[in-house]
Amino acid sequence: MTDAPRLLVLWCPDWPVVAAGAAAGTSPTSAAAVFSGSRVVACSASARRSGVRRGMRRRDAQSRCPELVVHQHDPDRDARLFEPVAAAVEAQAVGVEVVRPGVVAVPVDGAAGYFGGEAALAELLIDEVAARAGVECQVGVADGLFAGTLAARRSAVVARGRAAEFLAPLSIAELDQPGDDRGELVDLLKRLGLRTLGAFAALPERDVAGRFPKDAVLAHRLARGLSERPPLRRALPPDLAVTETFETPLARVDEAAFVAKTLGERFFAGLADHGLACTRLAIVAVTEAGEERVRVWRCAEPLTARSTADRVRWQCEGWLTARDRPTAGIVRLRLDPEEVVGGQALQLQLGSVGRDADAAERAARALVRIQGLLGPDAVVTPLLDGGRGPAERVRLIPWGEPRRPLAADRPWPGRLPAPSPTVVPRRPVPAEVLDAVGDVVRCTTRGELGYPPSTVAVDGGPARRVLGSAGPWVVHPALPTRRGERPLVRLQVVLEGDADGDIALLLTAPIGDSPQWIVEGCYD
């Protein structure tokens, strides 16, 4: 038994590549890929035959396919050019829902009965999309959106009530669909030996909730052939829809983009006030001539204010730029929540009414654009990892790369004790460390200073009196080298400062007769 509705899913393979090629005027049969930052988000069949895969870095993809046509990721373009496909489906079936650009879902029961069965409906829609939009597509029918999407990729019609049986032999990697971001969960399940959806579905739900990350419960429901979430069993407030009326009709894309942001924020804030989040959004537009256009967007994850505004903007752009666009400008827009879930599904955004989440999304988009201009290694973020010294513990990761510590859990004998320096110089800064009689302070191989430090001069500056010191700590090379690297000694010192306060430094030097001290870190 399943609680998932019976859906027909129409899928346009490699839609980001198809849309990008149509916008750029390149051949649809060429080897092409769409990149977000430095990673492949979609590639054509020709590129896949050369070894290009989703998630691959740009340099690797181009090394495997030198003739690869490169496109930048543009969700607005993908959504705008997908509107004719959705309109072609809507011409034959009611209740069309856009899952994402490239995928639409239709409740199958009514239309299949009218056209003589599910297989007949599938053939009709394939022909209709090819004739009206000039796009190739595949259709699948199954119980639930997840099973229907995988059925569409295989052009299969799954018998009613057999979704779990259909999903069972499929790879666990199918959980990581575009936009779902379940790569880490899939990797974890593979390491545990769960390599098929059936093996994952066989686990008790209580064990999944108690032993796996939070998003695993939703993935477990999908693997079992159930709907994304259990139905929300509560009466909904009557005032969740948001309507905006315009004195001057909207006829340009830039006007629609401005309105979409304001309308999306109002819609999200209204749901958040009732502890709700939307997973199916109906966008209704009424033109000055009385024409009404309706489009429903189905979302795997609850909509944020930003993602709501994106869908409103995409849909308005699609309507205003389509060949069968309305004969007059839009005078009224309404957002209706077709399906909502409890607010616990959107904990981050409900706490701040979307502001923090929107800021993070805007920052991420800006960083991806900078990467596109300057290269994938131009934008990096720091990650605290394993190592003995402060510089070794900080690893810079290109934006978009997985932020996984590689060696943070090792013992690291000789690691610098807490607290760590707050500033680590990018280049070695020389320092002169002298004892009370003006000789350079040295350290023996047993980790003992010949004499305590008395003054320190940094980078040719004035000598400052040492108010206190800690250490030394001896750090031996991790591996013997042919260059005969000597052990290092680390020393913490507090120097007499000025009106701004004293100065705390971490100093390092090789053990020997004439050590050259350098500043390895500074403390606030």
Image (cartoon, grey):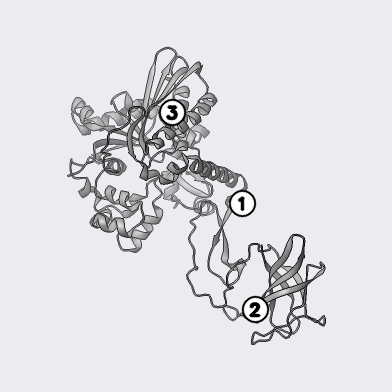
Q: Residue at x 53, y 65 (%)?
A: 385
The spot of residue 520 in percent (x, y) is 67, 69
Q: Which mark is residue 471?
A: 2
**Residue 98 x, y percent position in the rendering:** 36, 33
Element on which disc 1 rests: helix
Residue type (three-letter) at the residue carrying disc 3: Gln
- Give the class, few, some or many, for how many residues have Cα within 10 Å of label 1's Cα (few <14, many ≥20): few
185 left or right, relative to 31: left
**Residue 27 showing in the rendered view:** no
Dot 1 or dot 3: first in sequence order is: 3
Q: Position of residue 22 (x, y in %)?
A: 48, 33
Which amino acid, by three-letter code, is at mark 1?
Ala
* Left or right side of 235 for 26: right
Picture disc at residue 378: 1
Tell me which label, 1 or 2, sits earlier in the chain: 1
Above or below residue 43? Residue 330 is above
Q: Is residue 426 visible?
A: yes
Q: Identify which residue, 128 or 506, lies in the foreground.
A: 506
Pick the residue in front: 227 or 319. 227
Q: Quadrant of residue 145?
A: top left
- Give the camera-side residue of 356 and 431: 356
Disc with the residue nearer the chain's start (2 vs 3): 3
Which residue does the numbered mark 3 point to in the structure image?
315
184, above or below 30, in the image: below
Residue 321 relative to residue 336: left or right: right
Residue most extreme to the top: 289
Name the residue nearer the viewer: 14 or 3: 3
Contact (Cβ within 8 Å) of mark 1 with mark 3 = no
